[in-house]
Image: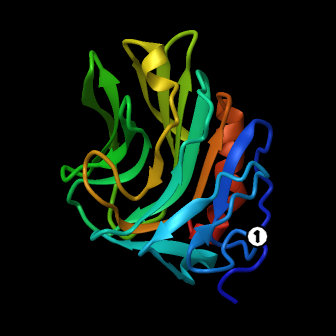
């Protein structure tokens, strides 16, 4: 079946949003992606379609498909976001977007690099990682922010690939407009199967645990 209960051995401490397209509770209809964390941070589905790839995922066609979680109602000075994704294009497109007042999110570039974008000095600015990627392959992304040091870390497939010190940690606390598949740099063209937010910084060991808990599902 397309969406069966799927309960990986992943980190739940501090989890405020957990969406998994392989879970029949999380995906029971065509309009809502239900939050499994118990915090009711559900996603409203616009045009994105569910399919059976890798146990269940949402397909975004690069033309008006997105899922809106909206305002989480709380600022998180320390946070972690992760998702499983595959892109169908080397054109730049936005994987997810977290805030409208102070834009921040994650994008892939036409140069086959990855980047997050954050507000620096009032301007949404790309910060590229050194990691290169390929279309048609599943990846596990983890992005986290530590307020005390104002450092953003990027992990791909459980391994840290980038560290960057930002200019103002208060800029990166807001989760007032969480959108999957749309944002400041275009709409997503590919698939996203799992999306999670924690209200704390996961350790490197926890990031690796999350990756290893589901990697066999995605063939990586």
Residue 9, above or below 131: below
Q: In the rendering, at what x and y percent does residue 174 appear?
A: 50, 29
**Quick check: 196 left or right of 60?**
right
Q: Which of 44 and 124 is in front in this view?
A: 44
Q: In the rendering, at what x and y percent does residue 101 appear?
A: 38, 31
Residue drawn at (75%, 36%), measured in percent from left and top? 14
Q: In which quarter of the image is residue 35?
A: bottom right
Residue drawn at (19%, 49%), measured in percent from left and top? 111
**Quick check: 134 left or right of 44?**
left
Residue drawn at (62%, 49%), measured in percent from left and top? 196
Q: Quadrant of the N terminus?
A: bottom right
Q: Quadrant of residue 162?
A: top left
Q: Which residue lies furthest to the bottom in this view?
A: 1
Q: Quadrant of the C terminus?
A: bottom right
Residue 77 can be seen in this image:
yes
* Within-10-Å neighbours for mark 1: few <14, some 14–19, many 20+: some
**Quick check: 42 left or right of 15?**
left
Residue drawn at (39%, 17%), measured in percent from left and top? 166
Residue 193 can be seen in this image:
no
């Amino acid at each position: 079946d397309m969406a069966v209960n799927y309960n990986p051995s992943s980190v739940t401490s501090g989890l405020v949003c957990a969406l998994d397209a392989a879970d029949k509770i999380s995906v029971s209809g065509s309009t809502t992606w239900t939050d499994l964390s118990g915090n009711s941070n559900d996603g409203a589905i616009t045009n994105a379609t569910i399919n059976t790839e890798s146990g269940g995922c949402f397909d975004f066609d690069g033309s008006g498909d997105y899922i809106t979680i909206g305002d989480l109602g709380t600022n998180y000075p320390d946070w972690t976001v992760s998702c499983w994704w595959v892109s169908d294009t080397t054109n730049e497109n936005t994987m997810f977007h977290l805030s409208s007042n102070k834009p921040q999110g994650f994008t892939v570039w036409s140069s086959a690099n990855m980047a997050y974008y954050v507000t620096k000095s009032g301007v949404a600015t790309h910060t590229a990682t050194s990691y290169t990627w390929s279309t048609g392959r599943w990846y596990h992304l983890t992005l986290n922010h530590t307020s005390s040091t104002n450092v953003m870390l990027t992990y791909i497939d459980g391994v840290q690939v980038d560290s960057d010190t930002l200019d103002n940690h208060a800029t990166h606390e807001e989760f007032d407009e969480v959108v999957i598949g749309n944002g400041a740099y275009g709409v997503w063209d590919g698939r996203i199967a799992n999306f999670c937010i924690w209200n704390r910084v996961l350790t490197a060991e926890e990031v690796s645990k999350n990756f290893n808990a589901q990697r066999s599902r995605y063939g990586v």
